[in-house]
Amino acid sequence: MEHTVATMPAARQPGCPFDPPKELVEARDQSPIHRYTFPAGEPGWLVTGYDLIRTILADRRFSSRKELMLHPTIDYSGIEMPTAAPGEFLLTDEPLHGRYRKPLAGRFTARRMRLLTERVEQVTAEHLDAMQQAGPPTDLVTAFAKPIPTIMICELLGVPYRDRGSFQEDIDKFMNGETPDEELIAAYTRVQQYLAELVAAKRAEPTDDVLSELTGGDFTDEELRGMSTILLAAGLDTTANMLALGTFALLRNPEQLAAWRADPALTDRAVEELLRYLSVAKTFFRTALEDVELGDRTIRAGDRLILSLNTANRDPERFTDPHGLDLRREPSGHLAFGHGIHLCLGQQLARVEMRVAFPALIQRFPTLRLAVPADEVALRPESADIHGVKSLPVTWDA
């Protein structure tokens, strides 16, 4: 029987801020793949099952090229999609993707990221000290979740300290799913102008950072600017939302929180489980470059596919009790960082940040709790690329 999903859901169920939209879960329970018609009438597919999504992400017959993509809720009739800007490696295929990614991969290895642990500990402690000194209540997003990854990725790239605040603000504007078009374009333009100046400064006077190292290669200024944009946006927004939404999830699961606080050895498993459970990077897109047999379906060349990672990471065919948060769960290959050649470049940095920040927070503030009712915590809209909370008001016993 052919399963069809008519529209992508606009919101999560009230009271279920961590769960995928109900319609997507129901669709996945019917079938791992569904017909989907894009707003302008183009035929496509919605893929909700773990095994199929993992297969697609590893198959180079499915393209990531920007000019082939369609948004599931926007009508692009009469609009020719642009190609990726130079350096935007997430939106390219091989061999161009490899040209950009390979020089970066050596600078984001697990070993190199572990060497940053001491610095992450220092940054985390500084922000916890500031929270403690200011006293409750506070917005955990602005006091803790955003600053830590902001400082780390900016230091890696060589963004001067004085400029980090404006970077964080502008990147949030083009990632939050709510910024009006005019403001979004202005924020994006400011980031591009700044990065152009930064690249020029690193070429003239290199410092000890990734961007300076890259200026020694054969990349153009435009390519370096595009690569830096991807690294900044991904390095700031995903981890910031994991830290905030993850803390929210822990506060709503006090037994799990208590278990982690009592047993710090759970940290590695707990971080992997939060990544699976929350799946903040919830949707990927691909386009078939040729006819492909996928399960019992034939995907035609040119068909667009929406990959629902949040339902894949809750797939009962892969995970026992998939909708439960279990910090003792044996890690079993979640797709929170994607898979295949586009596997998240910064995954090891994100892991280091979370392995340090979560335990430090819950140990420093053993009475940490929400300062507002849970249903009053404002979520990002489903139109945002990354799921999360707008703010997280918390308090504790001073």
Image (cartoon, rainbow, N blue to C red):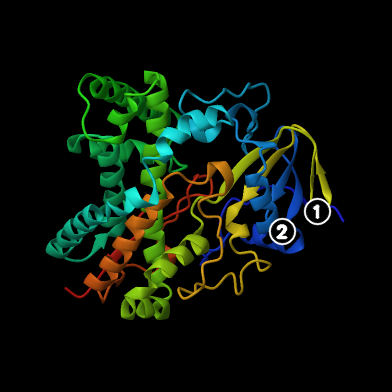
Mark 1 to mark 2: distance in Å?
A: 8 Å
Residue 80: percent from left, percent from top: 63, 21
Q: Is residue 365 above or below residue 341?
A: below
Q: Is residue 377 left or right of residue 125?
A: right
Q: Is residue 241 left or right of residue 9?
A: left
Q: Which residue is mark 2?
A: 27
**At 61% across and 73% down in the image, what residue appears?**
320
Q: How many marks?
A: 2
Regarding mark 2 in the picture, which secondary structure is present there?
Answer: helix
Residue 214: percent from left, percent from top: 34, 28
Q: Which mark is residue 3?
A: 1
> Which is nearer the eye, 357 or 167?
357
Residue 250: percent from left, percent from top: 40, 70
Could one spot residue 204 in this view of the protein?
yes
Of mark 1 and mark 2, the one earlier in the sequence is 1
Q: Which mark is residue 165?
A: none
Q: Residue furthest left?
A: 133
Dot 2 alpha-carbon crowd within 10 angstroms: few under 14, some 14 to 19, many 20 or more: many
Could one spot residue 49 in this view of the protein?
no
Which kind of residue does numbered mark 1 sit on?
Answer: His
Residue 164: percent from left, percent from top: 24, 38
Quarter of the picture containing the N terminus is: bottom right
Quarter of the picture containing the C terminus is: bottom left
Regarding mark 1 in the picture, which secondary structure is present there?
Answer: loop
> Which is nearer the eye, 37 or 151?
151
Quadrant of residue 244 within the rendered picture? bottom left
Dot 1 alpha-carbon crowd within 10 angstroms: few under 14, some 14 to 19, many 20 or more: some
Q: Is residue 7 above or below residue 322?
A: above
The reply to whether the C-beta atoms of the residues labelled 1 and 2 are less than 8 Å apart is yes
Q: Is residue 365 above or below residue 1?
A: below
